[in-house]
Image: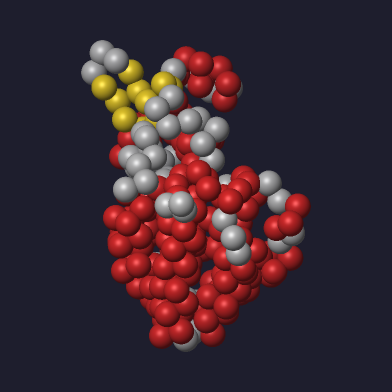
Amino acid sequence: MDAQGHGQPSGRRMSLADKAYAEIRDQLLTLKIRPGDALNDEALAKELGVGRTPVREALKRLEVDRLVVSYPKQGTYATRVEITDLAFVSEIRLQLEPLAAARAARVATAAQRAELAEVRHRVEEFDIEHASVTEILACDSMVHRAIYLTASNPHLEDTLIRYNNLATRIWCLVIDQLPRLQEHVHEHLDLLQAVIDGDEAKAAALAKTHIAGFENAVRSVLFAA
């Protein structure tokens, strides 16, 4: 997964913080760091090959993202994945994902449309049958973040990245049980094409259908009898 966050600080120390942020975030998203696990900055620093200061800065950013929580005199822990949050997260994404897709279709430059075409090609060539969970999540994330970036609204992008991260953690709980996983990934092809073609209405409709389908699929597994 590509590193992303709230701004891109410059300088060697901050670039190390970006590295720590991206690597810890991905471990949280894929549940390699399990919900409720304690995060020790010294152990993480050793694992990532960076100092404790970049790790501490990364953990502060992850707390803003609601992926970790810190308690005074107790430490920092991975936030729990609350299934009840699925409806709340989806409610927000159902409003904002179509907005971002429509805006991206409207404002994308020729260069950005070419970049989205390359992303689309990568999705088309993606071998989901032999992909790992991390690779599937990275593919999904690549598409969404490309659209958020193309929408050219940093506040919208920042918000959607956070909620996409929260949705990803819920997805990880059930990804091995989800039906239509290949179809879910390939839905991105039509969505990307609509943005590339500048079709705002179609892009918004496809984004909404995609998010609703995600919630329904996850819910069907979580609440199966």
- Name which residue lies at 46% across and 58% down: 220
Seen from this angle, which residue lies furthest front? 225
Residue 181 point in image, percent of width and height:
61, 61
Q: Is residue 217 above or below residue 66?
A: below
172 w.r.t. 213: above or below: above
* Residue 104 seen in the current view: no
Q: Is residue 110 above or below residue 50?
A: below
Residue 73: give x, y in percent of width and height.
Answer: 26, 13
For the residue pair 49 and 183, the one nearer the viewer reads as 183
Q: Viewed as shown, does residue 104 lie left or right of 126?
A: left
The image's colour scheme reads secondary structure
Q: Quick one: which residue is furthest to the left in this view?
A: 72
Q: Say which of 86 and 79 sits in front.
A: 86
Q: Position of 62 compared to 121: left or right?
A: left
Q: Quadrant of residue 205?
A: bottom left
Residue nearest the observer in this picture, 221 or 153: 221
Please say whether residue 174 is visible from this viewpoint.
Answer: yes
Q: Position of residue 69 (x, y in %)?
A: 31, 30
Query: How many numbered circles are shown?
Result: 0
Q: Quadrant of residue 127?
A: bottom right
Q: Position of residue 59 (x, y in %)?
A: 38, 30
Residue at 30% across, 61% down: 92
Seen in the picture, residue 116 relative to 58 is either above or below; the reply is: below
For the point 50% across and 44% down, the residue is 173
